[in-house]
Amino acid sequence: KMGRNEKTLEESANSEKGCEHGFSNASHVFGVNEVQVSMGSNANDKKSYVISGHWDPSDSAFVVLNRETPRDRRIFMTVAIDLVIRGIQEPVRFVIETKVRVYPHHERFWYFSKKPLVHLFSLKLKQVAHSPQGDQQYVVTSVDNLGEVERWRPSTMSLSLNLSSLTSSTLSSLSTGRSPSIASIETPGCDEDTDDDEPLLSGSGEVSKDCPQGELDMWRQVLPKLQAAPQQLPKGVSRLVKRGIPEALRGEVWQLLAGCSDDLDMMETYRVLITKDCASEQVILRDINRTFPAHDYFKEAGGVGQDALYKISKAYAVYDEEVGYCQGLSFLAAALLLHMPEEQTFCVLVKIMFEYGLRDLFKDGFEILHMRFYQLAKLMEEQLPELWLHFQDQGVEIHMFASQWFLTLYTAKFPLFMVFHYLDLFLLTGIDSVFQVALALLQMSKKELISSDFEGILKYFRVSLPKKYRNEDVARQLYKVATSIKVKKLKKYEKEYLALKEQEALQEDPVVRLERENRRLLDDNMRLERENDDLAHELVTSKINMRHSMDKLEDKCDNLNKEVVSLNAILNDAEEEKKRLLLEANQVKELLKREVDKGDMETQRNNAIITDYKKICSQLSERLDKEQAANTQTINMYKAKVSSCETCSGILSPVTGPPVELGIEESPLVTKLNQQVRELELELAQTKLALVESECKNQDLTHQLSTAMTELQATKNTWFQKTLTSISSLKERTASTGGSVIGNNPYGSAAVGHSSLQRQHSRDSNSEKM
């Protein structure tokens, strides 16, 4: 009999006193449909018994054991064993209670550790009457459970639960002795059930980047050839890869060996895949927390390493919808990620899964994986017969230790140096290397395995074997042995396995076979329906997005058309404005040309007048000089006459100075001539002044013309009016200034003196110099 009870963590915390693990609440008691009893863990053990109980997984009472245990709940299982003990009249019931955790269905191949649960019981007996045979008889007054005993013999008793036992294929194998249900399931990083000897954490070990110079020289010779033709391995590459790729070159050489060194399309696909949703996100998040926990790059929760590992695992689950996310895939991805960026890691991972056939192990109910187990068993039987017989005697099956090797490619438990070296070999030779390394591991551990019992063998594979290869020299020796092992009979064993399967199918009940086929087809149909729904959803979503994009583009096109029409209208207006401005510019040019010509004509006329005035002035100057000479001569004659007359001389002698200075009046003719000379000089000065002003105005007009030509392109209608107004005002101002200057005749003006004439003469001379 076995009983189970569920409680939440809160209920357990509130019931620490008064009951044990909540068994005072409602519990369920159910029975097993098959019980097997055997003597001990080996033939020499006569003091212990192994009792195995199997139940029907379709029973409604076992629903709690058919689904994954939530994080906030605990499941307890009670095993009650009734023992018939000599000397005791009634069977004695011993009850052991243990905590149980149920893992998902896809984790059924993880066999990590098993912790024996050992309890010590105390019986209080009371002696009764003797039996007819004369033996003493006892009755049990009490049975006390003294609690769990630490460091007890591991072969005494163990309780294990394997979710794979719930499948029909596993139930059918229970009758042949030990089955997968004997091995407990524990995931990496689970600290609840661990042995005293802790297994080696994944991601342990240091890998040195040092490499002998001779090794680097050989790689320097072959690497360019490998880069040029990665499909055909150059001579010597295979030998170098088997010896181990230098750590600094692994990332590049792995991509070349896988044939994806420049797969840009797959890299772009990866960037798209990481943006999509994935149904396995929760499983991925749980697994990456226990992937390579010993490595600093993946140790931090939510760090760069775990984030990259999450994106790669999610992208592959979306990319390969048939297989989806496979537990153990994160270990392989982590090993690759330590040597290359995310995109390249995804490309190499896809190559390994598809072209190297790793994904086939996860398909069709792990059918190919079982075939690999059969091949490895036949190779062990052929090459390690003594060890094979020992495993048969102890009931150790291949899947108990080799499942993880095939599914993770030795990346889950072994040191990093051995992991990286194995990936070198795997990318070179493919799936055959798994068999070679497996046989090498068994061969090098043959002595320890033969001397161990069932529990010791499983513990050796789980704890001791990975720790053995922390030494790099031992790991190198392992790969030397592995590369020397021949596995040419794999094809033969594959045909044998398929033949056995066909024979089993023929001997199998047609109803069972058809039911199995029907279940498989139903699963395929459900998968295809899911894929169809996903594709339909993507199609509808893409159509909606396309419709939105088209609407946006149509709106944008309409706006652009409106802008084009508006710009065309603006362009036409600009063309018309340009034509109008060109016409106005031509008109202004003609007007300015006429004004300039007119100014030139006025300048020529003024120059002619000035020339005439100069001639007149020169004639008048000559005439004035002659008259002054004549007047001087007359005066001198009068002076001589006066000086010759003593009477006149005496009369005039008191008066000092010459006759002119004595106040002798000049003749009217001289005065008139002097006055005319002054008038002519004044008129000449005024004419010269008008000429200078005309030249200045001519220069102003020329400057205005150049300015108008410059500003013509940037002006509009008002410019033309302003120009005409400015020219008209300038013309009027010029006319008024010329008239006032030339028209003013200051005859008899007392304000004009000799000094002003001198200044005018000097200004005239300066203008002539200019």
Image (tube, rainbow, N blue to C red):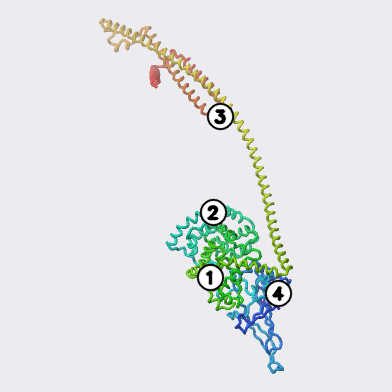
Q: Earlier in the sequence, mark 1 or mark 2?
A: 2
Give the label, 3 or 1, closer to the camera: 1
Q: Which residue is mark 3?
A: 715
Give the label, 4 or 2, closer to the camera: 2
Identify the disc placed on residue 262. Answer: 2
State whether residue 745 is above or below residue 226. Answer: above
- Within-10-Å neighbours for mark 1: few <14, some 14–19, many 20+: many
Alpha-carbon span between mark 1 and mark 2: 35 Å
Quarter of the view holding residue 567:
top right
Q: Which residue is mark 4?
A: 55
Of 366 and 595, the residue lying toward us? 366
Identify the disc placed on residue 348. Answer: none
Q: Earlier in the sequence, mark 1 or mark 4?
A: 4
State whether residue 173 is above or below residue 82. Answer: above
In the picture, which quadrant includes the N terminus? bottom right
Alpha-carbon span between mark 2 and mark 3: 63 Å
Question: What amino acid type should be assigned to the residue bearing mark 2?
Answer: Asp
Question: What amino acid type should be assigned to the residue bearing mark 1?
Answer: Ala
Q: What secondary structure is marked by label 3?
A: loop
Q: What secondary structure is marked by label 1?
A: helix
Q: Which residue is mark 1?
A: 440
